Image: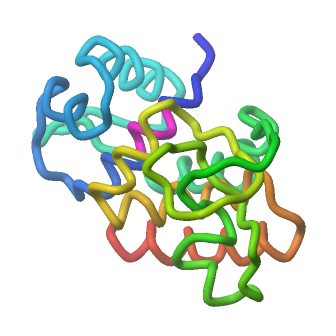
Amino acid sequence: MALKPQDVFVLLELVTQDGRPGTYQSLGAELGMSASEVHQAIRRSLDSRLAARTDAGVVPLRTPLLEFLSHGVQYAFPPEIGRPTRGMPTSVGAPPLDRHFARSDTPPVWPDPRGTARGPSFSPLYRSVPQAARADRALYELLALVDAIRGGQAREHKLACKELTERLKRSE
């Protein structure tokens, strides 16, 4: 069974929850997904050995997840870059990487009518990513780091991997 982009989205949400128990329904509500989509994402993550069942529930396996995000996500789920549009900044246009790069008038953005920036569209891992990111800053930052890996140049990729490593290891 092949991973889907939304599986990474669900795994990153599990990272931000830091072991707090939740239901498929509550995860779905937080991510703008159905409970069945969350269930399928978790099943694929378990099959891919990016997550494991524990007494507390399903938890992401941070070392394999970090390895996949650092070396595989850019090939498995490359972004579609499109025409300039209104949206929510991502990659180097969003925290935490925005402080490391010169401010751009056209940061990559997830298309979103409620967005505050205008730039080239950058396909999110799942359609509800902007909504979930607006509600959870920690998730937003993880998603932006993953997008810098998915679509960034060497410098952005390296810095995003370093920051992602610190965040995933810190919360182990």
Judge whether residue 9 is colored magenta.
yes
Q: Is residue 12 above or below residue 7?
A: below
Identify which residue, 87 or 4, lies in the foreground: 87
Q: Residue at x 49, y 44 (%)?
A: 113
Q: Position of residue 123 (x, y in %)?
A: 67, 39
In the visual, does 11 lie left or right of 76? left
Q: Is residue 10 magenta?
A: yes
Name the chief secondary structure element in magenta.
helix
Q: Quadrant of residue 41?
A: top left
Q: Quadrant of the C terminus?
A: bottom left
Rendered view: 160 above or below 74: below
Which picture quadrant has residue 118?
bottom right
Q: Residue at x 45, y 73 (%)?
A: 167
Q: Nearer the viewer, residue 167 or 172?
A: 167
Please provide the residue range marked out in magenta: 7-11
Where's the N terminus, which quadrant? top right
Q: Which color mode does the image show?
A: rainbow
Q: Residue at x 75, y 40 (%)?
A: 79
In x, y percent, where is residue 66?
A: 57, 56
Q: Which residue is painted at 89% across and 69% down in the image?
A: 154
Residue farthest to the right, as pictured: 154
